Image: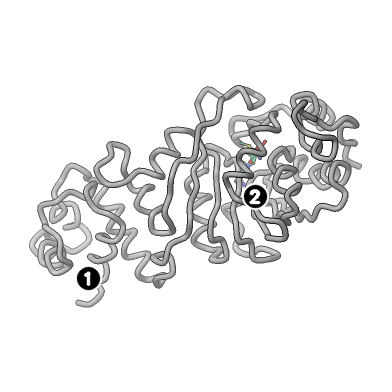
Amino acid sequence: MPPAPPAHPAGSPSVGPEKSQLLGPAEVRDLAELLNLTPTKKLGQNFVIDGNSVRRIVRIAGVQPGETVVEIGPGLGSLTLGILETGAEVIAIEIDKRLAEQLPHTVGLLQPDARLTVIRDDALRIMSLPGAPTRLVANLPYNVSVPVLLHFLEHFWSILSGVVMVQAEVGHRIAATPGSKVYGSPSVKAAWYGTWRTAGSVSRQVFWPVPNVDSVLVAFERSATSLASEELRIATFTLVDAAFQQRRKMLRQSLSSVFGDSRTAAGIIEAAGLEPTVRGEQLTVHDFLAIAEEAMRD
Ligand code: SAM
């Protein structure tokens, strides 16, 4: 039987007793001790120990009562409890067996009426969910944050918006637009699925253990591009990868590997209404899409 959760849920002086259903530093420490858990870097295990930060994330995400939210990597449940206290339902995917088994017990004690489903698996392998979540809210494991995010947006079309906490460097890259130094293949691929913005920074002091890097919140709203066909998405992503493999080269050169030679590439780029001499880092996802459409017409 899994160990009992802490008997004294965290409160903060500014919230009433009905709101004191989150985990604070003492509860996180107690739970980790009960589970004999030493957080691992490999799984990006940095747990949030501050209820105010949790409520801020949930507020920015705009979680609504009655909706279904998917959370990747719930850990000890810090963010899960914050989402659940709004009255939303949560589907949580956790790879760590001890954490996945404990979570329903923790939630059962602190918020007995909450609706939670825990799936114990690697989020990258999840191809179906028991429900149709409309929002994604997560403090993502840093080592797989971008692939996990893209995987969920690719496979779960019901997700229309969300907020994720990621390493600052990764967050700025995801939300970057053409012309920015950090604009790259993850920025364009993320833009395929939606519009992104950074939505505030998070101090490293709100985590246990304290990480070596800063974190940011990144918010997104799904866009129409993501509803294009799978064939078109793959064609577009192939162009994006080729363009950013040689990001300083002119597009007609960087795309020559895809189209056979630079002359053919130039013809397709021009037909799509773009200059073959531009560089990939100057193009939006819509530009890449236009080239892919043009190539598929041939
Ligand atoms: N949500 C919790 C919080 O905010 O305190 C924990 C966040 S912690 C940064 C990341 C969590 O993701 C850990 O619980 C870790 O075990 C889990 N995790 C790591 N890799 C995963 C994967 N591939 N699939 C699902 N969960 C994963």
Vertically, is 189 above or below 260?
above
Where's residue 139, x and y in %? 60, 40
From the image, state whether disc 2 or disc 1 is nearer to you. Answer: 2
Helix, strand, or loop for circle 1?
Answer: helix
Q: Determine whether the beta carbon of the residue marked 2 sits less than 8 angstroms from the nearest atom of ligand 1.
A: yes
Amino acid type of the residue tagged 1 in the rendering: Ala
Question: Which residue carries the number 1 mark?
Answer: 295
In this rendering, the answer to whether 187 lies above or below 9 is below
Where residue 112 appears, as percent x and y from the top left, is: 88, 49
Q: Is mark 1 within 8 Å of ligand 1?
A: no
Q: Which residue is mark 2?
A: 71
Residue located at (18% from left, 42% from top): 248
Q: Quadrant of the C terminus?
A: bottom left
**Direction from residue 4 to residue 241 in the image, left or right:** left
Quadrant holding ligand 1? top right
- Closer-to-camera residue (102/180): 180
Given the image, on which type of amino acid does mark 2 rest?
Glu
